[in-house]
């Protein structure tokens, strides 16, 4: 059975993570289901020069954020995990409070209720108390808050290397066995 990964893209900086996640999942034979908010598409256009159709072409399947009847809105649709890359504080708050007000937040809610892995690549600094409390709430529900912080101890030579390594770590965390993050072997 093919592994499935839901990928959310919201209106926080870091659209490169979503794009690389989609491309790497394809390389690994993982079926992807993309749901991108309008603000997420705005950021993908600003940061990467991609419009909605270009971004959606990178996924196996793309879903409109308004389509709350899509397959990823149901727990009966089995997935390995869901990654929101990047995750805005607005989407974090909606997920933390179970709003399910669009397909992205509904799919995240389904992921949590089915006890599947939900990984939120939260993007904001500095954090205020509401951000921290929302991250605690998601963590208490079983989600994983994974700010995309680069690992400098591997001596990355470019932004691409930092993005790639972060994505490999996220894929491994999502349970994609073929992921290949660099392993720290000590000094």
Image (cartoon, rainbow, N blue to C red):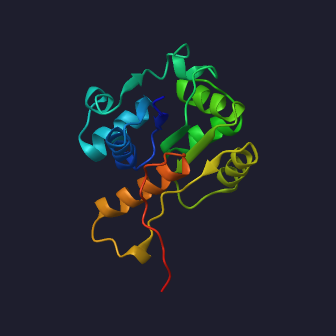
In this rendered view, identify the residue nearer to me: 77 or 47: 77
Q: Taking 53 as reference, is 183 left or right?
A: right
- Up-down relation of residue 124 to residue 50 (above or below): below
Residue at 55 percent across and 13 percent down: it is 69
Choose between 162 and 15: the one closer to the eye.
162
Q: How many marks?
A: 0
Q: Is residue 1 left or right of residue 111?
A: left
Can you give x and y, in whole percent of width and height, for residue 37 in the image? 45, 30
Front position in the image: 144 or 171: 171
Identified at 68% across, 35% down, the residue is 112
In the image, residue 83 lies at what x, y percent?
A: 51, 41
Q: Is residue 125 above or below residue 175?
A: below
- Which residue is at 54% across, 29% downward? 104
Task: Name the residue furthest front.
Answer: 1
Toward which corner of the image does residue 52 lie, by quadrant?
A: top left
Give how far across and how far down residue 139 sits, in percent. 70, 49
Please, is residue 123 above or below residue 2 in the view? Answer: below
Image quadrant assignment for residue 61? top left
Q: Position of residue 26 (x, y in %)?
A: 34, 38
Q: Nearer the viewer, residue 19 or 15?
A: 19
Rendered view: 137 above or below 63: below
């Amino acid at each position: 059975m093919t592994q499935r990964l839901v990928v959310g893209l919201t209106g926080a900086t870091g659209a490169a993570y979503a794009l690389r996640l989609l491309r790497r999942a394809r390389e690994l034979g993982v079926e992807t289901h993309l749901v991108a908010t309008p603000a997420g598409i705005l950021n993908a256009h600003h940061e990467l020069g991609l419009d909605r159709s270009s971004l959606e072409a990178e996924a196996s399947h793309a879903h409109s954020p308004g389509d709350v009847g899509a397959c990823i809105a149901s727990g009966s649709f089995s997935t390995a995990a869901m990654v929101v890359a990047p995750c805005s504080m607005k989407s974090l708050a909606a997920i933390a409070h179970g709003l399910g007000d669009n397909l992205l937040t509904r799919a995240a809610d389904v992921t949590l209720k089915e006890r599947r892995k939900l990984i939120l690549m939260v993007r904001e600094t500095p954090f205020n108390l509401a951000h921290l409390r929302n991250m605690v709430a998601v963590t208490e529900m079983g989600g994983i808050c994974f700010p995309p912080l680069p690992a400098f101890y591997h001596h990355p030579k470019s932004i691409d290397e930092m993005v790639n390594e972060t994505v490999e770590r996220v894929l491994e965390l999502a349970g994609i066995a073929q992921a290949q993050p660099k392993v720290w072997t000590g000094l």
